[in-house]
Amino acid sequence: QVQLEESGGGLVQAGGSLRLSCAASGLTISSYSMGWFRQGPGKERELVASIRRNSGTTAYTDAVQGRFTISRDVAKKTVYLQMDNLKPEDTAVYYCAAESNPFRWPPTTSGMDYWGKGTLVTVSS
């Protein structure tokens, strides 16, 4: 049984940092493309950052490029999202997700096979 569990969310002031973790069980994270998505109040869920299966190639949405970093520790079965210089517009529930399709890159919201339950990030101004 595959499980993804996010942690590390919380309340932070604008300009601060947080590191989110996604602990995976039941799958090998290097065999899946992993993504961090977010859904802000009244907004659709969007892809924030992703790391490709095997190669580890990364991709980011423009809004977080240069501020967020996705990484993985295969031995720990954990994917991270380091978030620096946070802005109030980064406030959202952040979800970790995994996709098995080797031909789709970057991942899409509708294409993910597994999802975590999310962790709330609130950035105050």
Image (cartoon, rainbow, N blue to C red):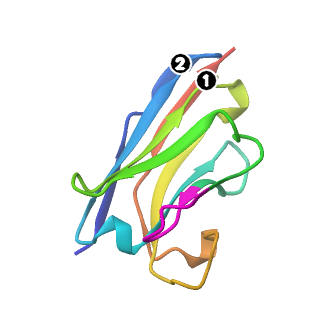
Which is more N-terminal, label 2 or label 1?
A: 2
| Within-10-Å neighbours for mark 1: few <14, some 14–19, many 20+ | many
Magenta part of the chain:
50-58
Q: Position of residue 35 (x, y in %)?
A: 52, 59
**Is the C-beta separation of discs 1 and 2 under 8 Å?**
yes
Disc 2 element: strand
| Amino acid identity at mark 2 | Val
Residue 96 drawn above or below residue 88: below
Disc 1 element: strand
Task: Write down the residue under mark 1.
Answer: 123
Work out whether residue 123 or residue 79 is closer to the camera in this orientation and state it. 79
51 is within the stretch colored magenta: yes
- Residue drawn at the location 69% of the way across and 25% of the way down: 87
- Residue drawn at the location 40% of the way across and 55% of the way down: 117
Q: Quarter of the image containing the C terminus?
A: top right
Q: Position of residue 37 (x, y in %)?
A: 58, 54
Q: Left or right: 64 with respect to 94?
A: right
| Within-10-Å neighbours for mark 2: few <14, some 14–19, many 20+ | some
| Amino acid identity at mark 1 | Val
Task: Write down the residue under mark 2.
Answer: 12
- Residue drawn at the location 71% of the way across and 41% of the way down: 65
Q: Quarter of the image containing the N terminus?
A: bottom left
Q: Position of residue 17 (x, y in %)?
A: 52, 22
